[in-house]
């Protein structure tokens, strides 16, 4: 083993910048090839990003490989707000706040039966922003979840048909929430910011079975991950005596909450029509029901009145959902290939559990891409367009929302991705 290359690979996987954001919550954009095939990329040959898409398929990597991927996501959308009588009281749009999904991977073949891989990529992330003076801001005007999973993985090839993998997951989340706090009965009009981070552990397991040279199936399980978040609390008043927060209009304290990121199952099928063309099908079951609430508790009242603004309760009660994807890959020659994909992602957000943190409905993603490779290097690019659809959700005036219901519409996300892989 070349120890210098191993050290370089580990450093690239662990230390690459991880900033992710998109119109959504679950991130599937882990490489340009994966983007191009709609996320249906569980059985790629010689691809280090298999660490993310299907750990059992790192047994398809020959030798020692490093890969980096950068995916740009730009969300756009509009909304309308209504009062209790159903009258429209505001229409607006999100502030375009693009983000990056960054993936870094390293895979090394130990011998004919064993492989080691490690990846650093985002599984959950989002960013949304709205005008601070809008009525939507009473629910949220800036929300950001930066996430990254580091996944050391061991894979074993039992024979020509079976391979399997198991890995740990070190998951990091950094959460920032900002909203306008309005409590007319208490004469309060201010702004709150909650910012914190958390580390937690999970695990994953995967298995592949090849029926023959043309047909293969695979399954991947990723465990749920429970985060106990400790955060800084900041409250800013309007500097008006009629509407102060406690402590000379400003409040600084601590906040805490518990969030469980969902477990998921991936089931995939790969068919090779011939040596040049193959088709992948993939279904992902995500148990979003673990996201039942986002309740944040404060160590002091924001307004100095016991029982008022000592917490920020928010029931979610999301339902479990499916994502379906199909991807096609065609090799024109030993060096050039083209890819295309489509994905359909169900909305798991109920009417009473929607908010301006994640104002997304069902998602349809259309994508294309191209790849160049020689014996040492691979470069891939991809473009995608995600139709986010519409979402209707309830407001909660009793909790400070300045509307009774909301309608998000004409939402979409532009996607562009590039990947580079190097063999040693």
Image (cartoon, rainbow, N blue to C red):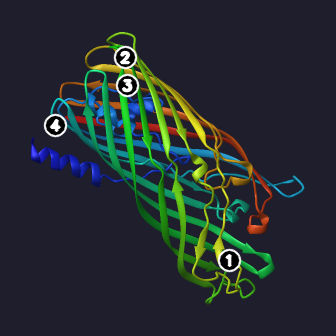
Crowding at dot 4, Cα within 10 Å, few <14 / some 14-19 / many 20+, comes out as some
Distance from disc 2 to disc 3, alpha carbons, whole Å, reads 29 Å
Quarter of the view holding residue 364 = top right
Per the image, label 3 sits on a secondary structure element best described as strand
What residue lies at 21% left-to-right and 35% top-to-bottom? 114
Counting from the top left corner in percent of width and height, residue 135 is at 73, 62
Local secondary structure at mark 4:
loop
Q: Which residue is tagged 3?
A: 370
Residue 3, given in percent of the width and then of the height, sits at 10, 47
Q: For the residues marked 3 and 1, what is the alpha-carbon distance in whole angstroms?
A: 53 Å
Q: Which residue is mark 1?
A: 309
Q: In the displayed orientation, state which residue is furthest to the top.
A: 274
In contact (CB < 8 Å): disc 2 and disc 4: no
Q: Which badge, 1 or 4, comes first in the chain's sequence? A: 4
- Which residue carries the number 2 mark? 211
Quarter of the figure with the N terminus: top left
Q: Disc 4 vs disc 3: which is toward the camera?
A: 4
> Which is nearer the N-term, disc 2 or disc 3?
2
Question: Is 201 left or right of 344, judged from the image as shown?
Answer: left
């Amino acid at each position: 083993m070349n120890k210098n290359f191993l050290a370089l690979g580990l450093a690239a996987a662990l230390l690459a910048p991880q900033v992710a954001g998109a119109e959504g919550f679950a991130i599937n954009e882990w490489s340009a090839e994966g983007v191009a095939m709609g996320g249906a990329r569980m059985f790629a040959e010689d691809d280090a990003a298999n660490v993310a898409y299907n750990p059992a398929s790192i047994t398809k990597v020959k030798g020692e490989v490093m890969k980096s991927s950068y995916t740009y996501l730009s969300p756009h959308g509009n909304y309308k707000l209504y009062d209790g009588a159903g009258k429209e009281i505001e229409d607006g749009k999100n502030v375009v706040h693009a983000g990056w999904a960054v993936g870094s991977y390293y895979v090394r073949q130990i011998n004919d039966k064993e492989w080691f891989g490690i990846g650093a990529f985002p599984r959950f992330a989002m960013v949304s922003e709205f005008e601070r003076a809008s009525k939507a801001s009473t629910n949220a005007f800036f929300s950001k979840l930066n996430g990254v999973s580091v996944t050391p993985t061991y894979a074993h090839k039992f024979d020509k048909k079976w391979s399997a993998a198991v890995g740990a997951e070190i998951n990091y989340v950094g959460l920032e929430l900002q909203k306008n706090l309005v409590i007319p009965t208490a004469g309060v009009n201010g702004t709150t910011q909650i910012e914190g981070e958390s580390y937690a552990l999970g695990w994953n397991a995967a298995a592949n079975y090849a029926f023959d040279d043309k047909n293969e199936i695979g399954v991947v399980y990723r465990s749920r991950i429970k985060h106990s978040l400790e955060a800084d609390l900041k409250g800013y008043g309007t500097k008006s005596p009629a509407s102060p927060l406690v402590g000379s209009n400003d409040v600084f304290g601590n906040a805490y909450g518990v969030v469980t990121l969902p477990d998921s199952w991936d089931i995939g099928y790969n068919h090779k029509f011939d040596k040049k063309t193959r088709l992948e099908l993939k279904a992902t079951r995500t148990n979003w029901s673990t996201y039942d609430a986002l309740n944040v508790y404060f160590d002091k009242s924001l307004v100095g009145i016991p029982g008022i603004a000592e917490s920020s309760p928010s029931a979610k009660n999301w339902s479990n959902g499916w994502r379906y994807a199909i991807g096609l890959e065609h090799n024109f020659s030993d060096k050039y290939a083209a890819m295309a994909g489509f994905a359909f992602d169900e909305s798991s957000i109920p009417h009473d559990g929607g908010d301006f943190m994640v104002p997304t409905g069902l998602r349809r993603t259309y994508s294309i891409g191209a790849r160049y490779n020689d014996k040492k290097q691979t470069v891939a690019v991809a473009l995608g367009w995600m139709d986010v659809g519409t979402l209707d959700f309830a407001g909660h005036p009793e909790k400070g929302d300045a509307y009774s219901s909301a309608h998000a519409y004409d939402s979409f996300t532009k996607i562009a991705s590039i990947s580079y892989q190097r063999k040693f």
